[in-house]
Amino acid sequence: MKILIAAFSLLILTSVEPAAKPNSPSNREENQNCFRCHSMSTLSYRDTTTGIIKSLSVSPEEFYNSNHKDLECIDCHSKDFQTFPHNAKLKNENLYCLDCHKDEPKFKQFHFESIEKEFKQSIHYQKLGNKFTCFDCHDPHSFEIHARISKDIKGTILYDNSICLNCHENNFKIKYLSGKILPSLYTAHSWLPHINLHWQSVRCIDCHTSPNTPGVSHAILPKGKAVKNCVECHSKNSLLLQTLYKFESKRSRNKEGFLNAVILNNSYVIGATRNYYLNLLSFIIFGLTLIALSFHGFLRIKSKKRKLK
Amino acid sequence: MKNEKLYLYPVWLRIWHWLNALLFLSLIFTGLNLQYSKVNSPVIEFHTAILIHNISGITLTLNYLFFFVLNIVSGNYKYYLPKLKSFGKDMLLQLKFYLSGIFKNQEHPFETTSSRKFNPLQQITYLNIMYALFPLLLISGWALLFPEFIINRLFQTSGLLLTAVFHTSIGFLLSIFMIGHIYLATTGTTVLSNFKSMLTGWHVHENHLVKSQLTEIKIQQVQNENEN
């Protein structure tokens, strides 16, 4: 029997060995105690009040690739979780991101205080109150920042949009949170030409948040206030430079000296994407044509008058 | 004795030509609106500009196909083909006329006849415009109508961007051609005679009109002097 238990434990241990790069051994060793059970993908329970199945599974691979990879589970969760079976009271543990992220110089650039304010203004909080938390969008066990560091804008778009679609393409979740079923995203966006292409090229939040924020905007607007005027993005001072291309354009400006480079290399936006040099060249050609033709016309008139004399 | 009047522009050609001109003006206007779109002072709304641009572009394609077929069927295509043997020489001759002869009131080096509607410069320009630039403009325009089918990355740049820059550049070149075309149309017997020909279909022979017109002008000058 002992051999069987040892073999079983070994099996679990090897199966949860993450593929990610090694971190500080203490964090790995400590977390290993939790992952022994919580790495099982089917680990879950049925909430007795709502009847919803809640997953308790955490992928070590995702965790050790996330922004929280250097943390121990008990840095956020109660130390009492170290005893097993866990105390039933621990089920009501209430975690809040800003407990750690507030007033920490390291996180200043992320403007968490501003994010907290924006979140309170967002339609999600306005409609759902405390029922809606940071964790509904950001899974702390897999979360990674994208827009600031990624050079692959399409990848950022895909990652960020999947956060929204996680609920907004899932009627069950929407019904659970809001009590109603929303129209399909295609119906709601039927006015938008080339829907799929737009969704691959901009993030939901680029139109559905107010752009005037220091970090990544969290003030999700009610649908009536979302950007619907094409020219907001499709013009030289494109809104996207304050949103999607915000961090990229700052980097690019330092490196290449002009703003357009970032859009030119990554995507095309009618009206906004104007190559400076081609634009200048077209004005020169147009101007020279007019000058040449006017001069030609002038000489023709002069010669005709001369002949008549 | 040469004919004084030539019927050079049949009805189908005139319809194609003026519809083409109209659509081109619409495409230039809406195209500029899209390229230089602004939030606060749009000349026309962005989506209206797109709608008009798309409808004009599709109509332009149909009009081009109409031209393409009838140009072959009617035999009009022959006017576009330059004489290969003397082509370089002929072209220089015509260029020399536009750059100097025209100011000395010399006659056009290549008289318009029923077998030669275009001078050598027109031939080479129209041939390139109608059978190279125009199809490229239409194809790239249609690609932009269905952007999801455009190759994503080409030479490490967005395929959509390259297609759009290509489309805009060809459109720009054709707009420049249009300006030159309208200007050169004024170098006929009188400033307006070529425009009239394209409306009536009849080309009026140059010498006849020059003489009669000069006489008219001289008579008027004499009358003016007498009055003074």
Image: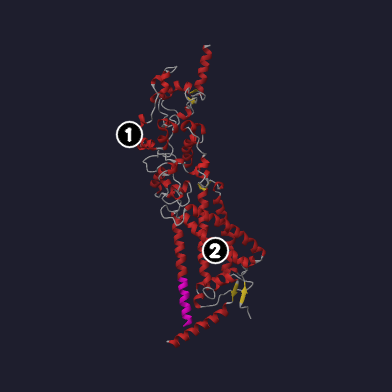
Q: Which residue lies at the image location 41% right of the left edge and 24% below the top edge? A: A73
Q: Which residues are magenta?
A: A295-309
* Chain that bears disc 2: B
Residue A77, image x, y percentages: 40, 24
Q: Main SS of the magenta segment? A: helix
| 2 or 1: mark nearer the eye | 2
Above or below — where is A139 with respect to B136? Answer: above
The tally of labels here is 2
**SS assignment at label 1:** helix
Residue B201 in view (yes/no): yes
Identify which amino acid the numbered label 1 is placed on.
Pro
Q: Which numbered dot is residue B111? A: none
Q: Is residue A156 above or below residue B178?
A: above
Q: Name the residue nearer the viewer: A192 or A158.
A: A192
Q: Nearer the viewer, residue B147 or A193?
A: A193
Q: In the rendering, which numbered label is found on residue A105?
A: 1
The numbered dot on residue B21 is: 2
User: Would residue A297 be counted in the magenta stretch?
Assistant: yes
Name the amino acid, label 2. Answer: Ala
**Residue ranking furthest to the top:** A1
Q: Position of residue A57 (x, y in %)?
A: 48, 25
- The single residue placed furthest to the front in the displayed view is A180
Q: Is residue B164 magenta?
A: no
Q: Is residue B135 visible?
A: no
A102 sits to left or right of B129: left
- Nearer to us in this view, A192 or A282: A192
Structural crowding at the residue carrying mark 2, measured as other residues with C-alpha within 10 Å and reported as few (<14), some (14–19) or many (≥20)? some
User: Helix, strand, or loop for circle 2?
Assistant: helix
Kindly indicate whether the residue at mark 1 contacts the one at mark 2 (C-beta within 8 angstroms): no
